[in-house]
Amino acid sequence: MTATPTPGLRSDPAAAAPKPGTPLRVVILGAGFGGLEAARALARAPAEITLLDRHNHHLFQPLLYQVATAALSPGDIAWPVRAIFRRQRNVRVLMAEATGIDRAAKVVHAAGGLALPYDVLVLATGATHSYFGHDEWAAVAPGLKTIEDATAIRRRLLLAFERAEVSTDEVERRRLLTFAVVGAGPTGVELAGAMVELARATIAGEFRGIDPRMARVVLIEAGPRVLPTFPEDLSTVALRSLERMGVQVLTGTRVTRCDPGGVQCGEERIAASTVVWAAGVVASTAGAWIEAPRDRAGRIRVQPDLSVPGQPDVFAVGDVAAVADAAGRPVPGNAPAAKQMGRYAGQAIAARALGRPAPPPFAYRHHGDLATIGRRSAVVALNNLRLTGLIGWWFWGIAHVWYLIGFRSRVVVSFEWLWSYLTFQRGARLITGDDTDAAGAASAAKAEPVPANDPQPARRQGWG
């Protein structure tokens, strides 16, 4: 759709057009990997860049599951966007949420009455969770895309153990100690493995009323195998590793209902205190704003130069773009792909600003598929090379540390991993936040009544 221009702001095409000799006005929506790389590629171009994001930080999403399972703190995998571009003087960072795009006037509208004229627009707005038509499940089965998602899941996980410790109802205790992960892609597999490690290694021996090692982690996949985008032999290795760890894997099983008490899979009911959704994603609504052609997941079908068909002044990169590689296969929605697309779009815009020929069409270079299953276990596919077990785990760790931003983050994360490896301890096991989520409210309703003379009723009921 086309947004309605905000009164009193510069929005007519003549005002939005650049004057000869003036820098190209580039607006980038989204400070993910694609947006950052596009801005960096324009560092030496005659361009005035506005980078807009609703958060003030860039987030390394591949390690969010470690925040959710208390292995890392949010600050270990997130960095202030302003700090990243402190020395790049042609970048202006704005924290605001885009609300629409006026294509005719070439203006981006954002919350707070902001209107940002552009000569070139880069859409790097990413993706969000897809519940396949059941958005009502989001409240009880959160996905894992933001720091808020990760800390909410961490809260649910840790509180489940705390509530089980004080429960005298054996049925409720089993429910509290059951955790379901829906979707067996890399996020689901890594999250399920980390949950088991948390229960069976990190907090084992810390409780007196329960044995955390008895926790049940169920990984549910609608398809025939885990890690469906990986080679089949690595999927088999991952399945065996998960089962050795104690994860219950259900393949060929479709979730038909999520509620505060657990999940329904056809005729089977899995009572669980915590459900995490890792089954699918859908692109942001940016494609609808500009009325671009999109695929079933909402991704914009871009041209070979990553521009939007019929709109050469608009580029789409990362999870919001539907791109095929040289063999016609869809480019995966991961960090390396987003970085490559962002860098290419920035270089194409820089060439335009400098009056140079456009670069050749975008060509994706696949860097491999990686997933960790748990301590000392991972699967890696690099073209014809396969790595598993400890070697794969080391390769996975080095690759992820490499993609972190800044020397400090690389050192901190490496040290945290080394400490966890040597001691089995995790230093981010903090329960924070308010008792507002649906799962917490449902579990609180099942808890025993608090005696009237209880000296700390708030603490006994304050969980979620």
Image: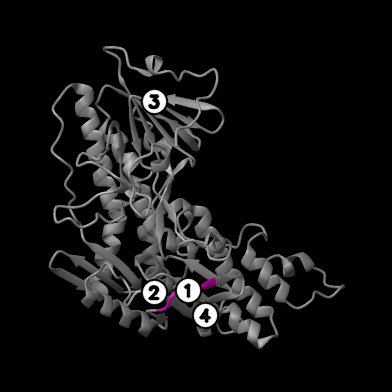
Q: Amino acid at mark 4?
A: Ala
Callout 2: SS: loop
Q: Which residues are magenta?
A: 253-257
Which residue is rendered at x = 29% and y = 40% of the image? 37
Which residue is rendered at x = 73% and y = 70% of the image? 460
Residue linked to disc 1: 255
**Closer to the eye: label 4 or 1:** 1
Task: Tell me how far mark 1 sits from mark 3, CA to CA.
Answer: 43 Å
Q: Is residue 203 visible?
A: no
Callout 3: SS: loop
Q: Say whether residue 113 is magenta.
A: no
Task: Tell me how far mark 1 sits from mark 2, CA to CA.
Answer: 8 Å
Residue linked to disc 4: 204
Residue linked to disc 2: 222
Whether 406 is drawn above or below 276: the answer is: above
Single out the residue that lies furthest toward the top. 20
Which residue is rendered at x = 15% and y = 25% of the image? 356
